[in-house]
Amino acid sequence: MKTLTLALVTAALALPVAANAQNRETLRQDHAQVQRDRADLRADRAEGHHRMARDDRRDLRNDKRAYRHDWRDWRRSHPAMYRTHVYTGPRGYAYRPLKVGHALPGAYYNQRYWVANPVELRLPYPRYGYERWVRYGDDVALVNTRNGRILQVYTNFYMR
């Protein structure tokens, strides 16, 4: 009886870890498929194969949709990662929606507002050097720290 109970407890503890690894692997595979579809589309366009390019566009669209759904499932199953401490912006600044190309005030892209580990949050890794992911309210922005230009924005990234 003890052996059966121990086996059931072990299985119950191992199941979430296996599901998490499977979910992570699914995301990785979907992302790789999107990259392959992009390469196929570029090759067909370069060679002038318009019908094949149209099919590749459809495949790319479908694979992006699958990746997006898996990404949403990941966020739903790991809500604690996207709920962090209460955000407090710099003094004297009010929230305004961010847009790519606009400049972010220097107070926002100092070390206090940096996203510590963007890879853990499934954000694209910033290029080495002068790019950083910055938290801005519930949003996250990729900022060029030399001039403050916003390169990419994910709105409502953090949950309340």
Image (cartoon, rainbow, N blue to C red):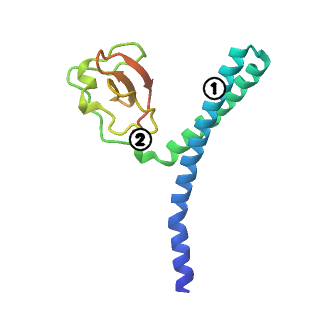
Q: Residue at x 68, y 21 (%)?
A: 43
Disc 2 versus disc 1: nearer the observer: 1
* Amino acid carrying mark 1 in the image: Arg
- Which of the labelled discs sits on residue 22, or is there none? none
* Amino acid carrying mark 2 in the image: Tyr
Q: Name, please, the residue furthest toward the bottom.
A: 1
Q: Residue at x 38, y 42 (%)?
A: 83
- Which of the labelled discs sits on residue 38, or is there none? 1
For residue 147, what is the image quadrant? top left
For residue 120, what is the image quadrant? top left
* Upstream in sequence: badge 2 or badge 1: 1
Tally of numbered discs? 2
Q: Name, please, the residue furthest toward the left.
A: 91
Viewed as shown, does residue 71 lie left or right of 93? right
Q: Residue at x 39, y 25 (%)?
A: 142
Distance from disc 2 to disc 1, alpha carbons, whole Å, reads: 29 Å
Crowd rating for badge 1 (residues with CA inside 10 Å; few <14, some 14–19, many 20+) = some
Q: Name, please, the residue furthest toward the front.
A: 47
- Residue pointed to by mark 2: 82
